[in-house]
Amino acid sequence: MQLTDQSLVLVAIMPNVRDMEIARVLGWYRIPMKTAPKIVRTDLIAFYQPKAFGADHQSRIEKYAEIRGVELVMRRELFRDEPDHPRAEEEYYKLQLGPLRELETPIPADRWKRFLFFYTTAEKLFSAKSMRDLAVVGAERDILWRSLQERANASFLPAAVQSQMMDPRLELQFLLGDLSLAGLDFDLPEDSLD
């Protein structure tokens, strides 16, 4: 994959060390469909590590990977040894990943501590000194919006949403939501992404 400054990055919570090992060894990451961002087909995914990673690695982004594919599966297909899990019959996006890579400089959260997902660009990911630097503002939001719009496959969107997307402002709001990072708290209960 050819990365550019405008390559699209999904920043996501890596809930625990076990899930990081799944990403490293098996090459996939899961997102419950009911809490998934609007677009999961991005170029890269960067993983925010909450307090489950211990004092030396919590509240920061240290690793990222290329997203090589996305499929929709049931949780029971991901974890065959947990057939009685309460969410075994729920749908999950299974993101196929390239090798996990380390950022040259980890990106600390500073005072922001809660979010599920947000989008940024490769340029911001590789130059950020803190999570604040990942925010996409001004004219850059237009570039990010166009990139997300290109990824949006109308066949994956409900008909009601498609009919409302004639107004570009509504489409932008649907695709991006509120990209402001102000007031976010990045630590989630461990089972929130299970």
Image (spheres, grey):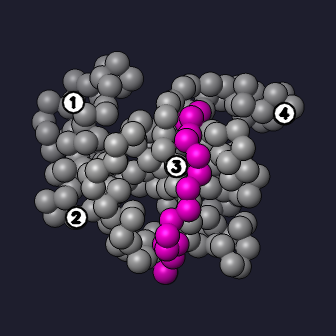
Mark 3 and mark 4 lie on one chain; the one further toward the N terminus is 3
Mark 2 and mark 1 lie on one chain; the one further toward the N terminus is 2
Q: Position of residue 154 (x, y in %)?
A: 30, 23
The residue that disc 3 covers is 65
Q: Magenta stretch: dominant SS?
A: strand
In three-dimensional space, the C-alpha distance between marks 3 and 4, rounded to whole angstroms, equals 27 Å
* Amino acid carrying mark 2 in the image: Val
47 to the left or right of 152 = right
Mark 2 and mark 4 lie on one chain; the one further toward the N terminus is 4
Q: Nearer the viewer, mark 3 or mark 2?
A: 3
Mark 1 and mark 3 lie on one chain; the one further toward the N terminus is 3
Rendered image quadrant of residue 150: top left
Q: Nearer the viewer, mark 1 or mark 3?
A: 3
Question: Quick check: can you spot residue 101?
Answer: yes
The residue that disc 4 covers is 82
Q: Nearer the viewer, mark 4 or mark 1?
A: 4
Near mark 2 (Cα within 10 A), the count class, few <14, some 14-19 or many ≥20, is: few
In three-dimensional space, the C-alpha distance between marks 4 and 1, rounded to whole angstroms, equals 40 Å
Question: Quick check: can you spot residue 183?
Answer: no
The residue that disc 1 covers is 164
**Which region is colored magenta?**
94-111
* Amino acid carrying mark 3 in the image: Ala
Near mark 1 (Cα within 10 A), the count class, few <14, some 14-19 or many ≥20, is: few
In three-dimensional space, the C-alpha distance between marks 3 and 2, rounded to whole angstroms, equals 24 Å
Of 188 and 21, which appears nearest the observer? 21
The residue that disc 2 covers is 137
